[in-house]
Image: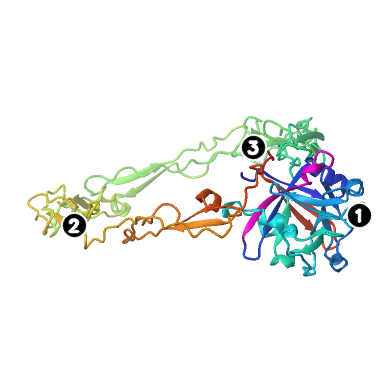
């Protein structure tokens, strides 16, 4: 199954562990060997004690159980998995464990509970004491484990050095005794995690300072199977709209009008006001209207002296300039004298000889020239013709000729000949399924451009052929037949047999697809039909759960729990 959620338990203590291990009837242990192989096994109390005792899970402290070997005390902190409690050991004197559906027992030499496995964090990466017992009793839980597929492997960070105790008349061994194998302990639970914060809601006021709120939910995921609730609050708030409320501006009263000028010739009187009664604040509206007002001095009946208008243009030049004259005028109306003002000084009319006036001459166009010759090939080239403004040339501010002195025409419009040119080749046709004497081909068209107006056709062939051998058409790979299964072992006790095949029937070439499927296949010797020493019935769940433990430099343990699904 996939990993549905990663959860954390910080500062591990007994209360935290009691929440993690909601199922105490069994535990899954994973092994990782020095060669990278990973295996899995279910361990339980002995079958005769399962109805009267559950497993014990602890951290650093372990009640009446004996502690780790004195040579490995520097490897703590550690998690602790105990099998039979002291009360049962005193009554029966039998200890041991059950792994992969098989009991492993010994009769204890004293009344101490000595059946347990310790998982070390080993912060300084020290090597545990190389202690061990090679008999099948001590290694049975490892021998009974099953090989995991590579796609279900866990990272090496989840595996720890371990020490197994079957003390008294049993024995004990460490991970380094078993070729530096490491182990991981499964935990079936899900802690709750927060969703993302919702966006902050609407502010309680629009100005002057208010409050807005945001919330989140403990559903990413929700706590399950005894997992912890989310830590922290599910809502928060912040200040908003702290800016001041807007104040609209208002006008003051108008000031008095300014004094009349000495002479009234277009001057104005003025009065003013200001937008300060009150002034606008905090994006309040500005005052509407102008802060000043004007009044003509005429309307105020101030004295107005007369002023000339501008001269009119000179009258038109005659068609022929002999003794004729030109004239222009002006009037005393800019402004006209009023309220006792003086009249304008000077004449209201002027005269000038047409010779002195240098009357203007407008320019005129010559006839168009003939069109330029067609180009050798018509590919966006243009034809052109010209004229000049010299019939006559403009003089004495006469008007220049209107329009352009040149004109162009596309060679296509002029129906110039257009030679044809090839378009790009099409892609080669697809390779045949079997490459014998077949050919592939490609084509092109004389359309870039198409020949027009007696232009030349394209030179060359419009189709090309090529042998499929020259084209290096792809050959797909095919499998050979499977080899025979590898030999059966002397005794069939969980060993794995394999068979293989090769992608050489034929070998893929020229980019052909490689064979689909696996080159090797494996199966247990029981499935293949090898003889066995005896069969062990067992029932194991399809899911598994894993734990990752992280400690800080000062020894505070943080357990990172990866939940792979429930047990069945």
Q: Mark 3, mark 2: which one is toward the viewer?
A: 2
Magenta region includes residue 40:
yes
Q: Earlier in the sequence, mark 2 or mark 1?
A: 1
Q: Quadrant of the C terminus?
A: top right
Label ID, residue 436: 2
Mark 1–mark 3 distance (CA, rounded to whole Å): 117 Å
Disc 1 vs disc 3: Cβ atoms closer than 8 Å? no
Q: Which residue is painted at 36% across and 57% down in the image?
A: 480
Magenta region includes residue 84:
no
Residue 44: x percent and y percent?
Answer: 76, 46
Q: Which residue is painted at 59% across and 38% down in the image?
A: 266
The residue lying toward the viewer, choosing from 52 and 9, is 52
Residue 565: x percent and y percent?
Answer: 67, 41
- Residue 177 lies in what quarter of the image? bottom right
* Mark 1, residue position: 112
> SS at mark 2?
loop
Q: Please give the range of residues in magenta.
A: 37-53
Q: Relative to 531, say whether 540 is above or below.
A: above
């Amino acid at each position: 199954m996939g990993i549905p959620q990663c959860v954390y338990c910080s500062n591990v203590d007994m209360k935290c562990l009691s929440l993690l291990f909601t199922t105490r009837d069994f535990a899954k242990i994973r092994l990782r060997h020095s060669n990278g192989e990973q295996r899995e096994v279910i361990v339980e109390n002995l079958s005769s004690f399962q109805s009267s005792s559950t497993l014990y899970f602890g951290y650093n402290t372990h009640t009446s159980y004996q502690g780790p070997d004195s040579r490995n005390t520097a490897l703590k902190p550690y998690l602790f998995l105990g099998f039979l409690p002291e009360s049962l050991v005193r009554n029966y004197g039998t200890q041991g464990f059950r792994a992969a559906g098989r009991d492993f027992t010994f009769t204890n030499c004293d009344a101490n509970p000595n059946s347990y496995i310790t998982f070390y964090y080993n912060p300084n990466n020290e090597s545990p004491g190389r202690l061990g017992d090679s008999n099948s009793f001590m290694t049975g839980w490892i021998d009974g484990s099953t090989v995991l597929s590579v796609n279900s492997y866990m990272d090496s960070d989840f595996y720890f050095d371990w020490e197994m105790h079957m003390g008294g008349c049993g024995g004990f061994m460490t991970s380094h005794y078993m070729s530096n194998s490491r182990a991981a302990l499964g935990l079936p639970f899900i802690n709750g995690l927060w969703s993302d914060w919702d966006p902050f809601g609407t502010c309680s006021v629009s100005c002057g300072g208010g409050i807005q709120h945001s919330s989140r939910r403990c559903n990413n995921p929700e706590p399950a199977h005894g997992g912890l609730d989310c830590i922290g609050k599910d809502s928060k708030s912040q200040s908003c709209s702290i800016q001041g409320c807007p104040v609209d501006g208002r006008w003051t009263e108008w000031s008095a009008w300014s004094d009349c000028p000495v002479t009234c010739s277009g001057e104005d009187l003025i009065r003013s006001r200001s937008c300060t009664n009150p002034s606008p604040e905090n994006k309040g509206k500005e005052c509407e209207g102008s802060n000043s007002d004007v009044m003509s001095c005429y309307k105020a009946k101030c004295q107005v002296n007369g002023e000339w208008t501008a001269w009119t243009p000179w009258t038109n030049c005659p068609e022929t300039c002999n003794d004729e004259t030109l004239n222009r005028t002006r009037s005393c109306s800019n402004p006209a004298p009023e309220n006792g003002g003086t009249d304008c000084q000077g004449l209201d009319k002027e005269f000038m000889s047409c010779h002195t006036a240098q009357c203007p001459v407008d320019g005129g166009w010559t006839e168009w020239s003939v069109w330029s010759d067609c180009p050798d090939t018509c590919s966006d080239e243009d034809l052109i013709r010209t004229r000049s403004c010299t019939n006559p040339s403009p003089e004495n501010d006469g008007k220049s000729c209107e329009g352009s002195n040149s004109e162009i025409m596309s060679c296509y419009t002029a129906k110039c000949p257009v030679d044809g040119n090839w378009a790009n080749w099409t892609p080669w046709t697809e390779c045949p399924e079997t490459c014998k004497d077949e050919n592939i081909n490609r084509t092109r068209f004389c359309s870039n451009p198409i020949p027009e107006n007696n232009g030349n056709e394209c030179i060359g062939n419009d189709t090309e052929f090529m042998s499929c051998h020259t084209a290096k058409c792809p050959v797909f790979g095919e499998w050979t037949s499977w080899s025979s299964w590898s030999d059966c072992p002397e005794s069939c006790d969980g060993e794995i047999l394999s068979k293989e095949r090769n992608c050489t029937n034929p070998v893929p070439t020229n980019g052909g697809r490689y064979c689909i499927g696996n080159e090797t296949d494996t199966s247990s010797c029981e499935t293949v039909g090898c003889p066995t020493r005896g069969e062990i019935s067992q029932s194991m769940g399809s899911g598994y759960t894993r734990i990752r433990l992280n400690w800080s430099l000062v020894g505070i343990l943080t357990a990172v729990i990866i939940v792979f699904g429930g047990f069945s």
